[in-house]
Image (cartoon, coloured by chain):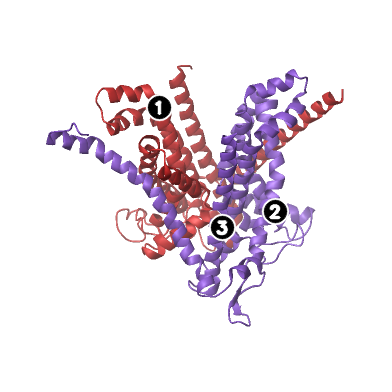
């Protein structure tokens, strides 16, 4: 702006450019500030378990002795959270393992088998799935799935299975839409070359399209896993919330998000119990950050190819 | 020959799974609407819930959901559009821009319960706003800001370069160009994205449990503009939304007809979310028509 000599031009510049530039830059930087402060605040509460209650990180993650009100022989509270961690991992893995084949089939159907029917009907329906609020999924789980399991399969109904099924349905749209985007973005000549070699459609899908779209599909799976891991209320409503590692599909169990949802309001701030909940929140934050790093790694490898 | 048989089998399996998924969706939505339609009536959406007897409605919760939506969008839209403008127009490729992208991705993948706990820590406790609409609105803002930023960035980037160059060539500054040329032509796309984002506010519950709270004072609609806790518009009062109410009524309610109330509230929630979806789709079609000139 060296050619701006007069003071009128300077005023104009402030009004017409500087204000907007500063405002939008402020908004951009705000995102950084926000992210750092979330990490900072959750971490500052989350590490108290380890600094003030002197629970070791190893015990917190790997011990399954959850007795926040009683002390062990060393005088530290027993805050082993392995049960919650294992519960979260198992139920999200269950959801991903069941959901991935179904979602990938849906994605293939939309892009390869019947694009017309797929784009007109299946894709909008899957988008509507995303819109259904998680409490509504939880409520359907509670009023349909839980009684169904109790009557027809056995157990109390409130179970690992119920939580897994609810999550399976919830993450299906995430995986299906990312997978179909990835299939759609493949160059058309892959398919043409395969057909020209005399391959059938199924052979083309299995041997050419799926391998080529694999990184994208995997991104969708990780996103689904992240969503399942962080989901709180829908799971909490159907999983039974009993603090033990499930010995079968029909056993009730609990997860990190469930115990936080249930106990955060009932525990006194500053108590060992409450501190442990904050440590679990910190763990959730770190894990979700881990998922982001995995996705970044996949996409950077893809763009290098 | 075998390959052809396998191809046929595979194709029919794909058809089967696609139909099963469709069927599942229709069963879920159908079930909610079927169960809820008997409960949904004018009285249900205009009367407050009851505590020990049947026949209560969800009027305050419905009001809270809409009011929270307005509050949070009032904060989210200017910040998200600002950040989108920055990312699309002002940010130079480099470390800081990369870091902002990482932050956006991190924010958008945070479990909503963690965002709720952050809100509880900062807005409810540190700033002493207590369980309030304002705390809840800001927690929702944290959840929606990354999506809003991405939507604005995409909308701005989709504006043809020639429009921008024409404006700059006429001597307009960059901000003038953004404000007077780019934003108006990106407007429809911005609105579509905003409506979709707004629809999500209705479904959110985990982030609100410990920010806007799980209770609603006995609202007095004749005292709209007072600073008392019973004034519906007071942003510093606690407010449970429709989603939080559905969760709460299942875990700790004493109402004998809790099932019916939850059915009705779920149906209401689904209908509102779908309306948002349909409206944004309709606007999306309008954009398509405008761009292609087709009917």
Q: Earlier in the sequence, mark 3 or mark 2?
A: 2
Q: Nearer the viewer, residue B1 or B142?
A: B1
Classify the position of the N terminus of chain B by image quarter.
top right
- How crowded is the residue under tag 1: few (<14 C-alpha within 10 Å), some, or many (20+)? some
Q: Which mark is residue A279?
A: none
Q: Which residue is mark 3?
A: A284
Q: CA distance from mark 1 to mark 3?
A: 39 Å
Front of the two marks 2 and 1: 1
Colour given to chain B in the rendered image: red
Looking at the rendered structure, the secondary structure element under dot 1 is: loop
| Quarter of image, res A1 | top left
Please, which chain is the residue tagged with disc 2 on?
A: A
Looking at the rendered structure, the secondary structure element under dot 3 is: helix
Residue B168: x and y, percent? 29, 25
Residue A269: x and y, percent? 48, 71
Q: Which residue is mark 1?
A: B159
Q: Which residue is mark 2?
A: A162
Front of the two marks 3 and 2: 3
Q: Give the vertical position of A78 relative to B21 (above or below).
A: below
| Marks 3 & 2 on one chain | yes
Q: Residue at x 83, y 25 (%)?
A: B3
């Amino acid at each position: 702006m060296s050619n701006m000599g007069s003071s009128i031009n300077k005023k104009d510049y402030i009004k017409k450019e500087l204000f907007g530039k500063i405002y939008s830059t402020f908004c951009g930087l705000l995102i950084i500030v926000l992210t750092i402060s979330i990490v900072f605040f959750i971490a500052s509460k989350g590490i108290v378990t380890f600094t003030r209650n002197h629970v070791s990180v190893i015990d917190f993650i790997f011990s399954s002795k959850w007795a926040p009100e009683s002390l062990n022989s060393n005088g530290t509270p027993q805050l082993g959270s392995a049960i919650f961690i294992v519960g979260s991992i198992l139920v999200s893995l269950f959801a991903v393992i069941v959901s991935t084949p179904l979602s990938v089939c849906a994605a293939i159907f939309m892009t390869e088998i019947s694009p017309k029917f797929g784009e007109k009907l299946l894709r909008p329906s899957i988008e509507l799935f995303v819109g259904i609020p998680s409490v509504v999924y939880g409520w359907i789980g509670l009023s349909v799935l839980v009684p169904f399991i109790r009557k027809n399969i056995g157990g109390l109904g409130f179970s690992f299975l119920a939580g897994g099924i609810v999550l399976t349905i919830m993450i299906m749209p995430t995986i299906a839409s990312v997978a179909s985007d990835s299939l759609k973005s493949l160059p058309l000549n892959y398919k043409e070359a395969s057909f020209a070699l005399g391959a059938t459609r199924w052979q083309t899908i299995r041997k050419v399209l799926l391998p080529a779209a694999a990184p994208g599909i995997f991104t969708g799976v990780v996103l689904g896993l992240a969503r399942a891991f962080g989901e709180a209320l829908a799971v909490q409503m159907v999983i039974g919330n009993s603090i033990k590692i499930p010995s079968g599909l029909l056993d009730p169990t609990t997860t990190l998000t469930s115990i936080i949802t249930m106990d955060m309001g009932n525990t006194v701030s500053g108590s060992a119990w409450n501190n442990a909940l904050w440590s679990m929140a910190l763990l959730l934050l770190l894990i979700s950050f881990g998922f982001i790093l995995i996705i970044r790694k996949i996409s950077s490898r893809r763009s290098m190819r | 020959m075998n390959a052809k048989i396998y191809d046929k089998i595979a194709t029919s399996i794909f058809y089967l799974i696609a139909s099963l998924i469709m069927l599942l969706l229709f069963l879920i939505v159908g079930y909610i609407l079927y169960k809820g339609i008997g409960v949904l009536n004018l009285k249900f959406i205009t009367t407050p819930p009851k505590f020990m007897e049947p026949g209560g409605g969800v009027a305050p919760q419905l009001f809270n959901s809409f009011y929270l939506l307005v509050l949070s969008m009032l904060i989210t839209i200017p910040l998200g559009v600002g950040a989108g403008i920055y990312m699309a127009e002002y940010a130079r490729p480099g470390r800081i821009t990369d870091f902002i992208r990482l932050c956006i991705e991190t924010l958008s993948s945070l479990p909503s319960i963690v965002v709720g706990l952050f809100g509880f820590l900062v807005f409810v406790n540190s700033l002493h706003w207590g369980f309030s609409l304002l705390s809840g609105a800001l927690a929702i803002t944290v959840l929606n800001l990354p999506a809003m930023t991405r939507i604005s960035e995409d909308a701005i980037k989709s504006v043809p370069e020639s429009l921008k160059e024409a404006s700059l060539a006429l001597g307009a500054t960059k901000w003038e160009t953004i404000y007077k040329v780019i934003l108006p032509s990106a407007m429809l796309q911005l609105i579509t994205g905003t409506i979709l984002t707004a629809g999500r506010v209705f479904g959110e519950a985990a982030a609100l449990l410990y920010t806007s709270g799980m209770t609603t004072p006995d609202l007095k609609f004749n005292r709209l503009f007072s600073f008392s806790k019973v004034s519906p518009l007071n942003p510093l009062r606690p407010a449970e939304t429709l989603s939080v109410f559905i969760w709460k009524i299942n875990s700790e309610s004493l109402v004998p007809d809790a099932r019916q109330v939850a059915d009705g509230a779920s149906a209401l929630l689904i209908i509102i979310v779908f309306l948002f979806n349909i409206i944004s789709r309709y606007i999306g079609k309008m954009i398509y028509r405008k761009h292609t000139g087709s009917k």
